[in-house]
Image: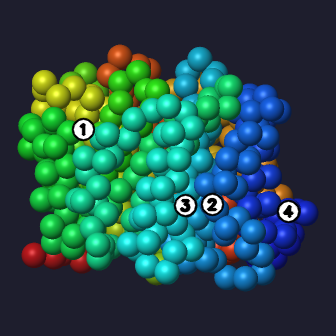
C-alpha cells in the first residue's frame, strides 16, 4: 500500500504552513461545536502565533526539526471527550520554531505568551518565576517553549505553557523540576512522583483557570502493565484495573502488535510480563494545592501510533475506549476528516496519542492527539507479531 502524496491528503490547502493549519483548525472548531465566528478568530490566532513562518510555502522543508510532531510540523491538535457528550478542542504550537537556536526560540515564545497575557489581561507571574530555570542563555535539550490554547466559545482561549526540564542539561532534569515546584509553592510535590526514566515537560496553566495546575510529565521506557497500574499518585484516582484496561486497549496488548524497528513492539518476558518496548508511555501529574504534596490529577498518555499498523486501527482503539467510558465517539472520525482526506489505512501517526485523564472532583476525560501531517505521512507499519524477550539480568 502506498502512502498518499501530500497534495492528495491536504486537499486544496497547499500553499503555506499557515493556510493549511488555519484551515484544519477552523474545520476542527466546527467538529467541536464552536461557532463560525470563533473558528475564524482561532484560525487567525494560530497563524499569528506561528508568526512569519505561517507564510512559509509548504514545498519548502519544515522550518526546524521540532520534536512537537513526528514530521516536524510545529502544530498539533487534540480533542478531549467527556461523558456528557461535550468535547473540547486544543491546539499546541511552537511559536519560535523558525528561530536559529533554542535561546532565540524561547525568547520568541515568551514574547508571544506575554503579548497574549496583555491582550486578555492575565498574569505571567508564575512563568516569570521560572524564566531563568527553563530559558537560560544557552539552553540544551529538544525544545524551549510550546504554547497550548484551549479553545472556548467567545474567542478567548485558556493558555498552557510547556517548558523543557533539560534546559540546563539532561543530567539536571530532576533537580530543575524539583526547584520549579519549590518556587511555585509545591515543596512536597516532587517526592510524591513515581519512578521515571525522564522528565520531558513541565507545564503551567496561565489565565482564567478555575484551579491553575503545574503539571510534571514523566517518561516510562519499556513499561510493563504491572508497573503502569501503580503510577497514579492522586487520591481517589484511577485504580490499577482501570489503568491496565486503558493501557491494554490503547496499545493493543493481547493482540498481534504491528511495528517495524522504528515504531517498536511489545515483548513478553520469560515471566510472562508484557512490556511496551517502542515509543515510551508518558504520565502527567498535576498539582493544584500547595498545602498537600500529592497530585490532584493524573493522565496516562499512550503513543498509539507506535503500536498500530495504521490509523484505522488507532481509530478503532480510540472508539473502544470512548464507548467504554460512555462517551460519544462520533466526533473523532469527523475530526480526522477535518485534518486530512487520506484513507486512514494509508498511514500511521495521524492519531498520535490516546490519553486517559483524571482530575479531582471531575469525571474522567479521554483525549485524542491529532497530527497535522503538513510535511509527511508515515507509511503504514509492516506487521510483526509480539515477540518473547530474551532473559536479561
Q: N-terminal of the two: label 1 or label 3? A: 3
- The answer to whether 381 appears left or right of 35 in the picture is left
Closer to the N terminus: mark 1 or mark 4? 4
Q: Is residue 384 left or right of residue 382?
A: left
Label 3: how many residues lie within 10 Å, few (<14), some (14-19) or many (20+)?
many
> What's the CA distance linking mark 3 and mark 4?
21 Å
Instruction: Say which mark, if any, is on residue 50.
Output: 2
Dot 4: what SS? loop
Mark 3 lies on residue: 95
Residue with the mark numbered 1: 232
Q: Can you say which quadrant of the picture contains the N terminus?
A: bottom right
Q: Nearer the viewer, residue 347 or 37?
A: 37
Q: Secondary structure at mark 2?
A: helix
Task: Say which quarter of the image contains residue 155.
Answer: top right
- Position of 48 with respect to 188 (left or right) is right
Give SS at disc 3: loop
Q: Nearer the viewer, residue 277 or 388?
A: 277
Residue 13: mark in rendering: 4
Residue under the image location 45 percent in, 43 percent down: 160
Circles 2, 3 touching at the beta carbon (< 8 Å): yes
Amino acid at each position: 500500500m502506498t502512502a498518499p502524496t501530500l497534495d492528495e491528503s491536504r486537499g486544496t490547502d497547499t500553499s503555506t504552513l499557515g493556510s493549511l493549519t488555519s484551515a484544519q483548525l477552523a474545520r476542527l472548531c466546527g467538529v467541536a461545536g464552536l461557532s463560525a465566528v470563533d473558528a475564524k478568530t482561532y484560525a487567525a490566532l494560530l497563524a499569528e502565533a506561528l508568526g512569519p513562518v505561517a507564510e512559509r510555502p509548504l514545498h519548502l522543508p519544515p522550518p526546524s526539526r521540532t520534536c512537537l510532531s513526528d514530521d516536524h510540523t510545529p502544530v498539533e491538535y487534540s480533542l478531549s471527550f467527556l461523558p456528557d457528550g461535550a468535547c473540547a478542542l486544543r491546539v499546541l504550537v511552537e511559536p519560535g520554531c523558525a528561530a536559529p537556536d533554542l535561546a532565540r526560540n524561547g525568547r520568541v515564545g515568551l514574547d508571544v505568551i506575554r503579548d497574549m497575557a496583555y491582550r486578555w489581561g492575565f498574569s505571567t507571574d508564575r512563568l516569570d518565576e521560572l524564566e531563568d530555570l527553563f530559558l537560560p542563555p544557552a539552553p540544551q535539550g529538544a525544545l524551549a517553549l510550546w504554547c497550548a490554547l484551549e479553545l472556548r466559545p467567545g474567542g478567548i482561549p485558556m493558555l498552557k505553557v510547556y517548558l523543557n526540564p533539560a534546559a540546563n542539561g539532561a543530567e539536571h532534569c530532576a533537580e530543575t523540576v524539583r526547584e520549579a515546584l519549590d518556587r511555585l509553592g509545591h515543596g512536597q510535590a516532587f517526592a510524591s512522583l513515581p519512578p521515571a526514566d525522564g522528565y520531558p515537560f513541565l507545564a503551567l496553566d496561565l489565565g482564567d483557570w478555575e484551579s491553575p495546575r503545574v503539571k510534571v510529565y514523566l517518561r516510562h521506557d519499556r513499561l510493563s502493565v504491572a508497573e503502569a497500574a501503580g503510577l497514579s499518585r492522586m487520591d481517589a484516582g484511577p485504580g490499577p484495573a482501570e489503568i491496565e484496561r486503558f493501557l491494554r486497549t490503547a496499545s493493543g496488548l493481547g493482540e498481534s502488535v504491528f511495528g517495524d524497528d522504528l515504531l517498536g513492539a511489545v515483548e513478553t518476558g520469560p515471566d510472562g510480563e508484557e512490556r511496551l518496548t517502542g515509543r515510551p508511555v508518558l504520565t502527567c501529574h498535576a498539582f493544584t494545592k500547595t498545602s498537600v504534596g500529592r497530585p490532584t490529577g493524573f493522565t496516562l498518555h499512550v503513543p498509539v501510533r507506535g503500536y498500530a499498523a495504521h490509523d484505522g486501527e488507532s481509530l478503532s482503539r480510540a472508539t473502544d475506549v470512548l464507548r467504554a467510558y460512555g462517551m460519544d465517539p462520533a466526533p473523532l472520525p469527523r475530526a480526522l476528516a477535518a485534518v486530512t482526506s487520506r484513507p486512514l489505512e494509508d498511514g500511521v501517526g495521524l492519531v498520535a496519542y490516546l490519553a486517559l485523564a483524571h482530575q479531582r472532583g471531575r469525571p474522567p476525560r479521554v483525549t485524542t492527539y491529532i497530527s497535522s501531517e503538513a510535511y509527511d505521512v508515515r507509511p503504514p507499519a509492516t506487521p510483526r507479531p509480539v515477540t518473547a524477550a530474551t532473559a536479561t539480568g
